[in-house]
Amino acid sequence: MRLFEEPPAKLTHWAHPEHELTLAATAGAPFRCDGCQEPGGDGPRYRCAPCNFDLHTDCALPPATLQHPLLFKGGGCTFVFLREPPAPAAASRQCDACGDDVRGFVFHCADRDLDLHPCCASLEDRIVTGGGGDGDGRVFELTKAASSSSSRRRCGVCGDKSRRTFWFYRGRFDGEDVFIHVACVKELAVRRWEASYRRRSGAGQIALAGAPLMEGALQSLPRRTRRSGGFERFSKIVGVIVSAIIAVIFGNPMGLIAAVAGPDGLLRG
């Protein structure tokens, strides 16, 4: 869901009243958002270059309240934008979408004691993978809680089952459910982001991670798909979902998308 329409080219923001912030389409290097304290890629952000101050567009232009469609289905849940996490301290609070700590700007629902990073609140409630051999038009829906059937299925990215308490996308492949944890996708992208942010290539660590990652993804496939050599089709579909998730929670960082879901990325081993 989009939190705003077309962003203005410049704005004055209460988090940095000293200078005007400018919308930078490509500022070059990865950054850490000074609002939510979460990573950002090389995509659009609001920036004060002299002060090295950056905000995700979602953090710079948040609505005062929102009702996320995923959480509204169960009877309504209104989130209020807060400049800092409510008590108790942020160390004990996690984003209910990705599972990471909440350390800055946050959407908080007091009635259900739920928290969302501003970028995670922008995750689409459904992703269509497209046609032309690039996913075959499959629909993956955002889901917030595992059912008894989903608890028996592995994540299509990591092959693990342990993160089903956080949000994931659910679709169908070869007649069976496929699950992709938002937390797993974010973890892979953060690994690449940290290497870039610290001005190190990180190539060795990323290459070493590829083999166990691909083994986990293979284990998540239905047995008949493994036997029929359907992994290439499967990886294309997963790559589309992974790219869509990274684009939202990191602010459209094309470099990170390529590093994780591209031809030589982590998903390809």
Image: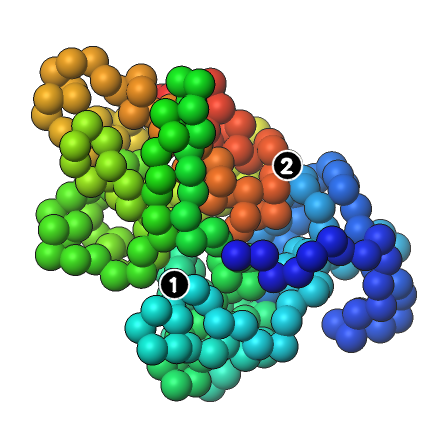
Q: Secondary structure at mark 2?
A: loop
Q: Tell me whether the residue at label 1 lies in contact with that at label 2, contact meaning CB atoms closer than 8 angstroms.
A: no
Residue 187 vertical position relative to residue 210 in the rendered view, above or below:
below
Q: Amino acid at mark 1?
A: Leu
Quadrant containing the C terminus is top left
Residue 104 vertical position relative to residue 222 in the rendered view, above or below:
below
The label number, if any, that marks residue 70 in the structure image: 1
Q: Residues within 10 Å of mark 1 (few under 14, many from 20)?
A: many
Q: Residues within 10 Å of mark 2 (few under 14, many from 20)?
A: few
Q: Secondary structure at mark 1?
A: helix
Q: Amino acid at mark 2?
A: Arg
Give the side of residue 225 with respect to residue 64, left or right. Answer: left
Q: Position of residue 101 (x, y in %)?
A: 44, 65
Residue plotted at (48% across, 72% down) = 67
Q: Position of residue 157 (x, y in %)?
A: 31, 36
Residue plotted at (84% across, 53% down) = 9
Q: In front: 159, or 37?
A: 159
The answer to which image quadrant residue 26 occupies is: top right
* Residue 150 appearing in the image: yes
Q: Position of residue 44 (x, y in %)?
A: 71, 46
Residue plotted at (43% across, 24% down) = 131
Q: Residue furthest top?
A: 229
Residue plotted at (67% across, 42% down) = 43
Mark nearer the N terminus (1 vs 2): 1
The answer to which image quadrant residue 265 occupies is: top left
**Closer to viewer: mark 1 or mark 2:** 1
Work out how far the residue at label 1 is from the one at label 2, CA to CA, in angstroms. 38 Å
Give the side of residue 88 with respect to residue 83, left or right. Answer: left
Q: Which residue is mark 2?
A: 199
